[in-house]
Image (cartoon, rainbow, N blue to C red):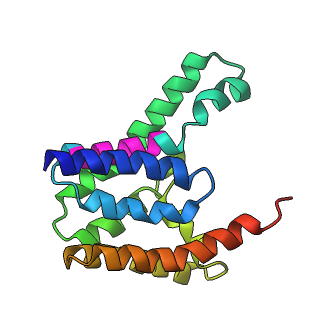
Amino acid sequence: QTVRNLICMILSIAIGIIAWDSYLPMAILLPVIWSKTDTKKSAWLVGLFYHLAASRGLILAVPVFFDATLIYGIFLWFAAGLIQSLPYLLCTSVRNHYLAIVLLLFALILPPVGIVGWANPLTAAGILFPGTGFAGLFLTLCLIWLMIWLYKKQKILAGVLGVLIILIPLVIKHNKTPKI
């Protein structure tokens, strides 16, 4: 179990880096990984490491934007990561994983966490289902639920392959769009 939690933490860092560099749809894998942790501490660390990895640009951006020292950048980066990781800890008390995922994702949007929050996996809905509004958010949530259900049914390979079949064309299309 300790090894599984460690793997979940490492994967959360990788997803944070990859998703917020250029492959945003990868972020929908985070709730699946979070749901596989078996202690509150490891669930919280998955959230913390993901948000720290996703927001690593703050370290250098804060000193430039606020004309401050690097210490302020590191402080704000870490403080924001801590605030954003709290829902991951609190939502582990919910026994139903599907409900816990909904509560987690919406806790990341709503104040007070949403004020300093970014890197919400639901943001991927804009790329996965562009122009669909709330329906796209719901479809993204359904995709996350499907991955969790497949994992529970020991069909994780089928789930990962299905998600990749959906995501790869979208990511390729998204990355070929000219940037203005």
Q: Nearer the viewer, residue 38 or 89?
A: 38
**Does 3 sit above or below residue 171?**
above
**Does 39 sit above or below residue 110?**
above
**Does 177 sit above or below residue 136?**
above
Residue at position x 55%, y 37% from top? 56
Q: Which residues are magenta?
A: 42-52
Point out residue 31 in the picture as x, y percentages from the top left corner: 35, 62
Point out residue 62 in the picture as x, y percentages from the top left corner: 64, 29
Name the dominant secondary structure of the magenta segment.
helix
**Does 28 sit above or below residue 153?**
above
Point out residue 28 in the picture as x, y percentages from the top left corner: 45, 65
Report whether 126 appears left or right of 29.
right
Residue 15 shows in the view: yes
Residue at position x 56%, y 21% from top? 72
The residue furthest right is 180
Report whether 49 appears left or right of 76.
left
Residue at position x 62%, y 69% from top? 171
Point out residue 12 in the picture as x, y percentages from the top left corner: 39, 50
Q: Is residue 103 magenta?
A: no
Tally of numbered tags: 0
Residue 146 shows in the view: no
Q: Quadrant of residue 146?
A: bottom left
Q: For the C terminus, give its image quadrant.
A: bottom right
Residue at position x 83%, y 64% from top? 178
